[in-house]
Amino acid sequence: MLSASALAWARSLAWRALLPLCLAGPAAAADIDRGRYLVEALTACDNCHTPRGPDGYRLDKRFSGGSQTFNGETYSVRGPNISSDAATGIGSWSDERLAAAIIAGVGPEGRLAPAMPSEYYRILTARDLEAVIAFLRTAAPVEAARPAQRRDGEQKAEIFPGAEAPFEESALDDPLRRGFYVATLARCMECHSGETNGALDHKEKLGAGGKLFRTPAGTAVGANITQHPTAGVGAWSDAEIKAAIVAGVGRDGKPLKPTMANLSKAHFSKMTPRDLDALILWLRTIPPRPGP
Ligand code: HEC
Ligand code: HEC
């Protein structure tokens, strides 16, 4: 059951204020290419919405639903079918409904569980949001029933500080803001910030590491990627940090655990040099913190 307040919010028009006004018109080829880049190199929608086989993503069933179940105190959900199938996917959804799900976390039954990371996607510029939607619509329709989602009570989602509102396109010309944009869409801090009382603490523990991941491949701990010279990556060269991000390789040259390395290989390896340089520039501004 959704709480009354969550439903009221979803039904209210409040979230509409977040939507750009320009969601209209057929997508140009450039939009689709930009959308593909954003989805494949940064937002990694496949990670939760495409089933996996022994060799990675089942691209023949792309976007038909993820393999992983996300459990939180108030939810147990799986990435549903977002292929263009009209009956079981998002083929019949308007651009506005899609935008509401992607950047405001509003789904057909009200507030989505925060496992859908809309709080990191709200920053998408109007043009980039359009591009993501345009690319999503190019995926082949795959029939796959919607998973039975469990949501109990209010779905609380913390907005990533700095990502409260869509960026203006011009912000991406500033390398530092571009770096923040890249880090936000790639959700680096959703895995790398430390926690206080079980909740991510982007203010006091930005990038400080310590979050625990239990996966079929074993456990992993989010690394400290602050500028701390010993606990973090402050003493690493740019090339060493880049190798961790795009190749999933640690400073010692050994492969990082799959929680990071899979994203590196499937997604971050596709980052443009411009985005990667901007990302490093922003990472260098993270205050050093000890830990985890
Ligand atoms: C970390 C995992 C994760 C990532 C990454 C992710 N999603 Fe989701 N998404 C989910 C989950 C889980 C749900 C279901 C939440 C619920 O039902 O409460 C969901 C729901 C949705 C929905 C609503 C669909 C429906 O039928 O209810 C849409 C649309 C969507 N996601 C699109 C996207 C797009 C586009 C991207 C990439 C820009 C993306 N998601 C990235 C996990 C993710
Ligand atoms: C799904 C969670 C997740 C996301 C998203 C993620 N990381 Fe990681 N990352 C990890 C984990 C877990 C490790 C530790 C891997 C290990 O122990 O081998 C790691 C390791 C690293 C390392 C190596 C640090 C060290 O001390 O070995 C760097 C650098 C890094 N990540 C940067 C990033 C950046 C930058 C982003 C965003 C572009 C990012 N990560 C996104 C989970 C994630």
Image: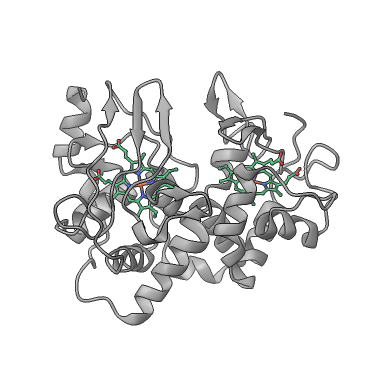
Q: Nearer the viewer, residue 58 or 233?
A: 58
On the question of residue 164 being in view, the answer is no
Q: Is residue 261 above or below residue 9?
A: below
Point out the image quarter for the C terminus. Answer: top right
Q: Nearer the viewer, residue 79 or 175?
A: 79
Decide which of 44, 15 is in the foreground and name it.
44
Which image quarter has ligand 2? top right
In the displayed structure, 193 sits above or below 263; it is: above
Query: Can the viewer see residue 50 in this picture?
Result: yes
Q: Residue 38: which quarter of the image?
A: bottom left
Task: Count the labels in the image.
Answer: 0
The quadrant in which residue 118 appears is: top left
> Which residue shows up at 43% across the image and 38% down it?
68
Q: Position of residue 252 (x, y in %)?
A: 85, 49
Which residue lies at the image location 52% right of the left edge and 47% below the top edge?
A: 187
Above or below, comparing residue 207 to residue 253 in the picture:
above
Q: As displayed, is residue 27 above or below residue 60?
A: below
Q: Is residue 107 left or right of residue 49?
A: left
Q: Residue at x 51, y 58 (%)?
A: 42
**x and y percentages locating residue 208 in the rendered image:** 68, 35
Q: Quadrant of residue 110?
A: top left
Q: Residue at x 35, y 27 (%)?
A: 76
Q: Residue furthest toward the front?
A: 54
